[in-house]
Amino acid sequence: DGGITQSPKYLFRKEGQNVTLSCEQNLNHDAMYWYRQDPGQGLRLIYYSQIVNDFQKGDIAEGYSVSREKKESFPLTVTSAQKNPTAFYLCASSMGFRTVAPVGSGNTIYFGEGSWLTVV
Amino acid sequence: GENVEQHPSTLSVQEGDSAVIKCTYSDSASNYFPWYKQELGKGPQLIIDIRSNVGEKKDQRIAVTLNKTAKHFSLHITETQPEDSAVYFCAASTPYNTDKLIFGTGTRLQVFP
């Protein structure tokens, strides 16, 4: 099946520990994204990548790092520098900026099922 | 940068009634406006979107309207059903990064049988 796979679904982090969330897509999408969602709130962009080996900071990048070595993979590392990491993390993908969208603009962004991270 | 406001934060309706959720955006150059439905513990799913070259779009029981002059867009759900209960998010694309979305804070819709 085509889609976006996030793992693990639930992850616990100890104080001072780095953890990595996995995101894989088989949609052949160029662009990938990481969003953070806190309870009862909207989605905030952490990092995004338009193409392999390139990525940009979003609105709340501090304490996070990413890599984009392969088109289908965009892992997110939550470092010990992120002081309040407990949240629901969502990976997403889209065809990307280089793809001509229908009249108007904007390509559909598809989301994975999310990963819950809790600090213990 | 772009800012998206969404109202109401919670909405309760009786099954069969209509539900309307409204969003406003700040950047007049924004040109793509999707709506997502998120069920508890799951990722958001796109339910409908609209681009700036049209004023209304409909898909069965859901419709979206866009008023570019007033910079607001709305989601309309008719004949609501209990399975419509979820959190709904609106979003707007930043003008110079067409796939970078700014989200509203969400509306929790409850449909009572």
Image (cartoon, helix red, strand yellow):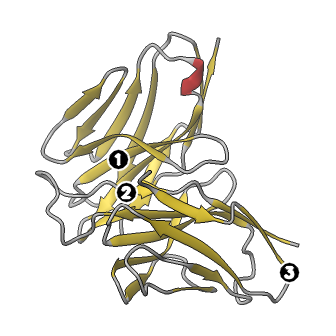
Amino acid at dot 3: Lys
Earlier residue among tags 3 and 2: 3
Query: Where residue B14 appears, x then y in whole percent?
Result: 59, 13
**Residue at 50% across, 12% down:** B17
Query: Where residue B42 appears, x then y in whole percent?
Result: 61, 48
Tell which subunit mark 1 falls on.
Answer: B
Query: Where residue A102 appears, x then y in whole percent?
Result: 14, 52
Tell which subunit mark 2 falls on.
Answer: A
Residue reaching furthest right?
Answer: A120
> Is residue B26 visible to us here?
no
**Badge 1 local density, few (<14 within 10 Å), some, or many (20+)?**
many
Residues A45 and A115: in front is A115
Query: Where residue A111 appears, x then y in whole percent?
Result: 47, 56
Q: Are marks 2 and 1 in contact (CB under 8 Å)?
A: yes
**Badge 3 local density, few (<14 within 10 Å), some, or many (20+)?**
few
Residue at numbered disc 1: B34
Is residue A85 placed above or below A10 in the rendered structure?
A: below
Residues B2 and B88: in front is B88
Q: How far apart are labels 3 and 2 at the CA level?
A: 32 Å
Check residue A109 in the rendering and tell me which mark sits there, or answer none. 2
In terms of secondary structure, where does tag 1 sit? strand
